Amino acid sequence: METPPENQPAPAVVTPPTPFFERFTNFVETFRKVVVDILVFLIVIIFFITLINHYSKKQLIIYPFKACTAITNQGYTGEILTSMVLDRIHQIKNAGSIYYRQNQLEMPSWDNGIDEYKDAVNNDIFTQASTLVKFFYSNNIKTAAGDIVAYGKHGIALHMRVGDDMIQLIADSTSGLDNLIDKAAQFVLEKTDPYNLASYYLSQQDPVNCLRITQKLLNDKKLHTLALQLRGSAYIKVDSCADNVIAIKFLDSALKNSKEKDKWLVYWNLGRAYFFQNDTAHAIKSFVESIKRNPENHSAYRYYGDLLRIEFENAGYDKKPIKKLDDAIDKYKTAIDYSPSEFNEYVSLISALYDKKAYYERQYYAGLHNHPVPQEVKTGKAQSEILAVNIGDTFRTLTEIYPDTCMTYFKLGQIQEAHYQCADALASYQKAKALCKDTLVQRQIGFYIDKISPAPGSATVNKKGKKVHA
């Protein structure tokens, strides 16, 4: 019997191959764990980035107001009062920001500006993480609070605090609560967003408060030019030469320091200041420069048209430059092309068309004394009739844009009265009064009606040319 040779290796143990399905299952499970771990990691990272971004913004947290019994008895809670202030803050900010959006200006930012306004209610489900991030970014958070107390027998007083600044606002009775809320919102914005507040005052035609805010902003070197422009705009007055001189001074200074893309607005404001200063030459030059830099500035075309009409009116009767009036009409039409729903542009166009119609009518009646009647006189009559149709078409367009608006007919009445068309003006005033729903405005329109209404017993001429008695 043979014995196996020494040192002969033992036979290899063969492991049976793993089934394909089992290998695939293991791979999927491993892949799933990796993907889940990555997703969890990304969610955590995104969450903390969101928190950091949120709390790195400069915030003003307004705590619930404390209210006296007289206020709580009317159903107001501290949370409701805080919400009312926040709503008013956002309304003022939106109204103020319109100035920058419409005029294509960059929204101003400054070192003390606030990015968000919110109440102190915390709905964050990750309170622990939120508190940690708040701790590191506490310098970006300001707080505000209000306390409404009884004042005198029937009045109330609001003590408003923003950071370290405080103000006391007083109302004679609880009915003045809305006014206090409005003033509180303005106080908050004065301390946190003065540029929007200044433009809000400008839009509300409140030059005193606008000048008060912009005086403080002149020290902001970063936005010194914008402060000069706002201040110059606030000084522009229809009937104050002294204020317009000051406005021109500020706007000239703003012009020297403005970026080229912003100069159109400075020129536009300069044109307005010169316009109300009765400096036609400088006003036209300013509006031309404004249009060069912003051809879509519809208001500049309207002012330019007004100035051309002034030059037309100031010329002697025998030398009236009709081309000036034609150019003015073209400017008004261009303004309407860029702003098809702007009320003032249509009113100016209608007024200019009436001027041109009156020009041709005067020319026609003056030429009737010549025999034979010159051809240009006959042409003048035809032009007058065409213009009457143009006026009617333009006014119909205006009434389609502003249907049932008493101001549309009132403005038409003023234009007709200025051109001595009293019967037409009377009808327009009466239509305006019928459409008006404000009693005070109705009374004011009534004064115009009484002024041009024929006195009892006076003779008037009807459409057939016969005299009748009122």
Image (tube, helix red, strand yellow):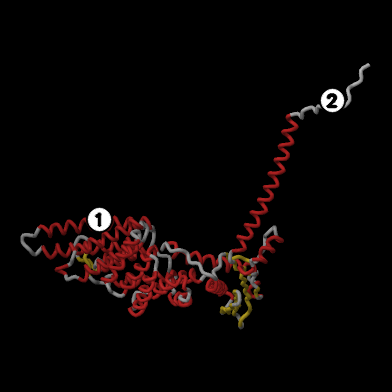
In the displayed structure image, the side of residue 56 where residue 337 appears, left or right: left
Disc 2 versus disc 1: nearer the observer:
2
Q: Amino acid at mark 1?
A: Val
Which residue is under mark 1? Answer: 389
Q: Dot 2, how many residues are within 10 Å of its Cα: few (below 14), some (14-19), or many (20+)? A: few
Horizontal and vertical percent position of residue 214: 46, 75
Instruction: Say which quarter of the image contains residue 464.
Output: bottom left
**Is disc 2 in contact with disc 1, using a CB cutoff of under 8 Å?**
no
Instruction: Say which quarter of the image contains residue 51.
Output: bottom right
Screen quadrant of the N terminus: top right
Question: Does dot 1 land on a helix, a strand or a loop?
Answer: helix
- 181 and 324: which one is in front? 324
Instruction: Say which quarter of the image contains residue 459.
Output: bottom left
How many numbered callouts? 2
Screen quadrant of the C terminus: bottom left
Which residue is under mark 2? Answer: 11
Q: Amino acid at mark 2?
A: Pro
- 6 and 62: which one is in front? 6
- 464 and 323: which one is in front? 323
Horizontal and vertical percent position of residue 155: 59, 80
Question: Does dot 2 land on a helix, a strand or a loop?
Answer: loop
Q: Is residue 258 above or below residue 34?
A: below
- 417 and 67: which one is in front? 67
